[in-house]
Image: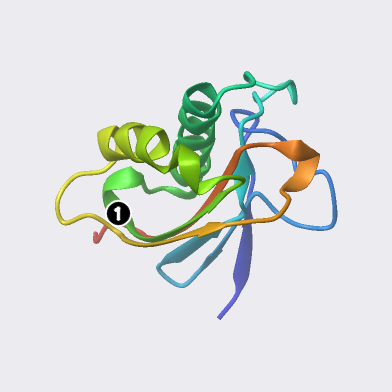
Amino acid sequence: MDKHRIHTDNAPAAIGPYSQGIRIGNLVFTAGQMGYTPAGEPAGEDIATQTEQVLNNLSAILEAAGTDMAHVVKTTVFLQSMGDFATMNAIYARYFTEPFPARTTVEAAALPRNVLVEIECVAVLPEG
């Protein structure tokens, strides 16, 4: 199978040797997204603002790949502090519908750029 790079100007550009997303077959894998605007500026210093921006970034990448949040099957959430879980979870719940994606949430000792949250996902392309 061929790997296809996913890129959109509606999410922050990759800042290293990686892609915003990769499509292979009917699967889309995103890079971890942080609370930065598409222009590369911090979205805010609180968990709510960062989570909202992260999920908007993921949505933009998925749209560029030809899918959307309704087709996400797995997410991995990295939190700087599990104390932020409830706030992150409340915002996260607004972006997904039943059946919710499988999810792993872990507390990380440190995240890039000292952000509070990073989320990556795997989605499928819609049939047809």
Residue at 30 percent of width and 34 percent of height = 90
Name the quadrant containing residue 73.
Answer: bottom left
Mark 1, residue position: 71
Q: Is residue 81 left or right of residue 73?
A: right
Percent position (x, y) of residue 40?
75, 26
Image position of 98 (left or right of 109): left
Of the pair 5 and 43, the residue shown nearer to us: 43
Image quadrant holding the N terminus, namely: bottom right
- In what element is the residue under mark 1? helix
Above-or-below relation of 123 to 79? below
Residue 72: x and y, percent?
Answer: 34, 55
Taking the spot 79% from the left edge, 38% from the top edge, the residue there is 113
73 versus 60 height, above or below: below
Percent position of residue 92, x then y: 35, 39
Q: Position of residue 95 (x, y in %)?
A: 31, 36
State left or right for residue 5 relative to residue 119: right
Looking at this view, is 82 or 52 the one in front? 82
Q: Is residue 118 left or right of residue 102?
A: right
Direction front: furthest residue: 83
Tag 1: residue type? Answer: His
Q: Quadrant of residue 123?
A: bottom left
Q: Residues within 10 Å of mark 1 (few under 14, many from 20)?
A: many
Q: Seen from this angle, which residue lies furthest right?
A: 16
